[in-house]
Each structure stands twice: as C-alpha cells, then as structure tokens.
Image: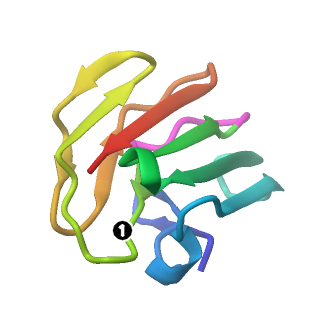
Amino acid sequence: MLLMEHGEDLWLNPLTTSNWLQDGMTIAVKNAPTRFGKTSYSIRSQLKQQFIEAAIDPPDRAAPKHLVLRVRHPEGKSIRGVTVNGQAHQDFEAAAGSIRLEPSTKPIKVRVEY
C-alpha cells in the first residue's frame, strides 16, 4: 500500500486512499527495504493552501528506472502543476495523481499544486 516495485520502477504511495491526505495529514515511510535499497519518504497535505508536499530519500543501493509518486486529492481534484526541487516538472498524470521522477542519489522535494 505504501511502496511497490513495478518492473524497473519504484512506486511511492501507490495504493493509499485519498482520505489519508486530508488537510494537515502526513504519511511517512522510513528505511523501507526494496530491491533497489532502503528508501524513505514523507507526504504532507496542505490542502487549505492548495498543495501537497513530499520529501523523498531515494533508494541507497541501485537506481530504479523511475520513481513514481502518487498523491490523490481527497476531493478528486486534478493536479494543476508540479515542482521538483524548485523547478517546474511536466511528467505527471493530472487526473491519476501520479508523478514520474528521474532517479537521484540526493533527496528530492516535490510540491503538487491543486
């Protein structure tokens, strides 16, 4: 529910219900083992301000082809925009709430606007 290997991709938060991201709620995973190595992430909902933020510590052993972060809005709203480490990011599926990220060895900060 919180982490899933799918082929060569690593999905973060793939199957949690949208209710887990009500305003002010946080989802956190620490040192989860995967075939790519341990990974951690946290997602904090700030829906009163129209955004959700995520902090990702990528796997520490091998890079997946992609990291895919899934954040579904509790009211079913589509993503309007995404920034990754402060830069505009276009590789996302607005209605599905999924964001495809290139692997990194450094922490990744994601901001999702609604």
Look at label 1 and name its amino acid: His
The answer to whether any part of residue 79 appears in the image is yes
The answer to whether any part of residue 58 appears in the image is no
Indicate yes or no whether the magenta region holds residue 93. Answer: no
Residue lying farthest to the right in this orientation = 31
Find disc 1 in the rendering and name its residue.
Answer: 73
Image point (54%, 63%), residue name: 23
Residue 73 percent coordinates (x, y): 36, 68
Where residue 3 sits, quadrant-wise, is bottom right
Figure check: 10 above or below 14: above
Q: Is residue 1 left or right of residue 98?
A: right
Q: Is residue 34 left or right of residue 74?
A: right
Image point (59%, 80%), residue name: 1
Figure check: 32 above or below 89: below
Name the one closer to the observer, 49 or 64.
Answer: 49
Name the one closer to the observer, 53 or 93.
Answer: 53
Indicate yes or no whether the magenta region holds residue 64. Answer: yes
Residue 16 percent coordinates (x, y): 53, 79
Where residue 81 sits, quadrant-wise, is top left
Q: Is residue 101 left or right of residue 23?
A: left
Residue 50 percent coordinates (x, y): 36, 48
Image point (45%, 34%), residue name: 110
Residue 39 percent coordinates (x, y): 72, 46
Q: Which residues are magenta?
A: 60-66
